[in-house]
């Protein structure tokens, strides 16, 4: 059995705070800010904040055996507290930007939810959202086929050229 640990090191990092405006999707808030700064790779940590709309997915085992898991239909829980979330911003298929985010939510009835956030559907509440961002100009994550799960997932990559203008 081969090791599942994949890593790339990089000591050149930038740290900053990012705000997502009320009424804006997580995707638009993150992508527009990082794209404007020419950032291709980042790790994001969300502070607690309200969402006017929260949609997430879970990934139960995929029964046909074609892949390890399969994300289910989005679960819309309406307004919710985004208690915590972490995300990776990197390169998707054809090097298009991709944001992969998992979060812990508390709905209006104080029930807990968690899973893969639908970043295009999750909308920041009235106070907006605050994130801590760590960006790396030379290393990050890009989607590649993972032969164990038979799914396209993030793998670490290194680029020897600067990738952002902070």
Image: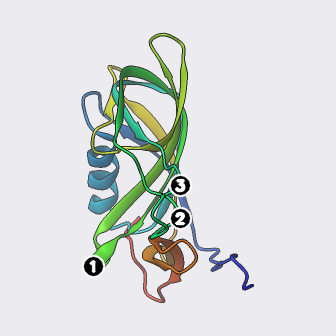
Which of the marked residues, 3 or 2, is nearer the chain's N terminus?
Answer: 3
Question: Eyeballing the image, is 41 above or below 125?
Answer: below
In percent of width and height, residue 51 lies at: 37, 26
Quadrant the C terminus occupies: bottom left
Pointer 2 residue: 68
Marks 3 and 2, how far apart at CA? 6 Å
In terms of secondary structure, where does tag 2 sit? loop
Quadrant the N terminus occupies: bottom right
In terms of secondary structure, where does tag 3 sit? loop
Q: Quadrant of residue 91?
A: bottom left
Q: Residue furthest top?
A: 109
In percent of width and height, residue 12 lies at: 59, 73
Foreground pick, 69 / 92: 69
Which residue lies at the image location 44% right of the left edge and 12% below the top edge?
108
Marks 1 and 2, how far apart at CA? 23 Å
Question: Eyeballing the image, is 139 above or below 75?
Answer: below
Which residue lies at the image location 42% right of the left edge and 51% below the top edge?
71
Mark 1 crowd level (few <14, some 14–19, many ≥20, 10 Å Cα): few
Question: Eyeballing the image, is 64 above or below 8?
Answer: above
In percent of width and height, residue 103 lies at: 52, 39
Pointer 3 residue: 61
Which residue lies at the image location 45% right of the left edge and 67% below the top edge?
41
Which of the marked residues, 1 or 3, is nearer the chain's N terminus?
Answer: 3
């Amino acid at each position: 059995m081969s090791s599942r640990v994949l890593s790339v090191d990089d000591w050149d990092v930038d740290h900053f705070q990012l705000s997502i405006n009320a009424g804006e999707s997580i995707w638009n808030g993150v992508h527009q800010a990082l794209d404007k700064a020419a950032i291709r790779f980042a790790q994001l940590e969300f502070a607690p904040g309200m969402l006017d709309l929260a949609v997430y997915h879970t990934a139960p085992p995929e029964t046909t055996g074609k892949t390890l898991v399969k994300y289910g239909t989005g679960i819309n829980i309406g307004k919710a507290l985004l208690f915590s979330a972490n995300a990776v911003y990197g390169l998707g298929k054809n090097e298009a930007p991709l944001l992969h985010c998992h979060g812990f939510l508390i709905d209006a009835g104080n029930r807990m939810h968690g899973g893969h956030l639908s970043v295009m559907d999750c909308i920041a509440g009235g106070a907006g959202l605050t994130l801590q961002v760590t960006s790396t100009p030379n290393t990050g994550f890009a989607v590649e086929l993972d032969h164990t799960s038979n799914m396209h997932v993030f793998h670490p990559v290194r680029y020897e050229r600067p990738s952002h203008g902070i």
